[in-house]
Amino acid sequence: DAGITQSPRYKITETGRQVTLMCHQTWSHSYMFWYRQDLGHGLRLIYYSAAADITDKGEVPDGYVVSRSKTENFPLTLESATRSQTSVYFCASSVMREQYFGPGTRLTVT
Amino acid sequence: GIQVEQSPPDLILQEGANSTLRCNFSDSVNNLQWFHQNPWGQLINLFYIPSGTKQNGRLSATTVATERYSLLYISSSQTTDSGVYFCAGEYGGATNKLIFGTGTLLAVQP
């Protein structure tokens, strides 16, 4: 029972590079979410998806792109990474309104 | 506006003590959930508690939706209870989107 996994767990990249964070869930949950966690802000929603091919913006979508061609995968792409995108990124999925989180990806942009 | 506020921001307990964490939420927020983030960063769903009271072992939660607050009770605290406790509520209609409070950092000392 793998649940929800994220890769990579740690990533260091340079300003201006494109980075893709992967999220995979084995439960076939319809809803999936990307959050970022920064000190003093708690968790903030970047994008969410209600089903395959249905995505929408959250609180802080600027600089991020998502896609969801398959129910189980929800990748998050930083098209041109900036230092302000240094953060811990969490993917989540939900069933019956309860959300379940992946282990997180710690991203550092230098 | 859409707001979730938690108190206290920090709490230090001796092992065996009881504690109450509070979450206040604005009118546009519903369907509260409580999460625990352990010292290794993993987020665990504790309760989905839109109203009423639920109990799970030494933890229980109560939401009074009409008064826009929720409480998380931790009894006979243990060192493994340490970490950050977040409450989060749904906003924006039937989208499962969550807005998080900034958390309560709990340290349980042996």
Image: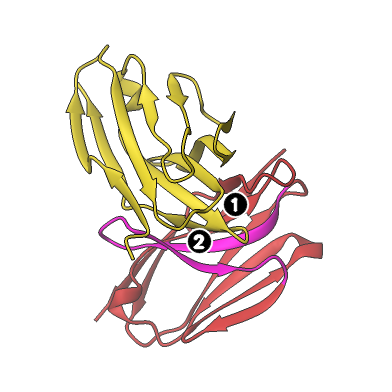
Residue B89 visible, this angle: yes
Image side of residue B62 versus residue B9, left or right: right
The chain holding disc 2 is B
- Provide the residue designation for mark 2: B8
What's the CA distance linking mark 2 and mark 1? 10 Å
Quadrant containing the C terminus of chain A is top left
Q: Residues within 10 Å of mark 1 (few under 14, many from 20)?
A: some
Quadrant containing the N terminus of chain A is bottom left
Give how far across and how far down residue A104 sits, in percent: 32, 47
Q: Which mark is residue B5?
A: 1
Q: Are marks 2 and 1 on the same chain?
A: yes
Callout 2–callout 1 Cβ contact below 8 Å: no
Q: Which mark is residue A3?
A: none
Q: Which chain is yellow?
A: A
- Most common secondary structure along the magenta stretch: strand
Amino acid type, label 1: Glu
Segment colored magenta: B29-51
Q: Residues within 10 Å of mark 2 (few under 14, many from 20)?
A: some
User: Which residue is located at x 41 percent, y 87 percent?
Assistant: B76
Amino acid type, label 2: Pro
Q: Which chain is red?
A: B
Relative depth, front residue between B12 and A15: A15
User: Which residue is located at x 57 percent, y 83 percent?
Assistant: B55
**Residue A70 shown in magenta:** no
Give how far across and how far down residue B96 sits, in percent: 63, 49
Disc 1 is placed on an element classified as strand
Relative depth, front residue between B89 and A52: A52
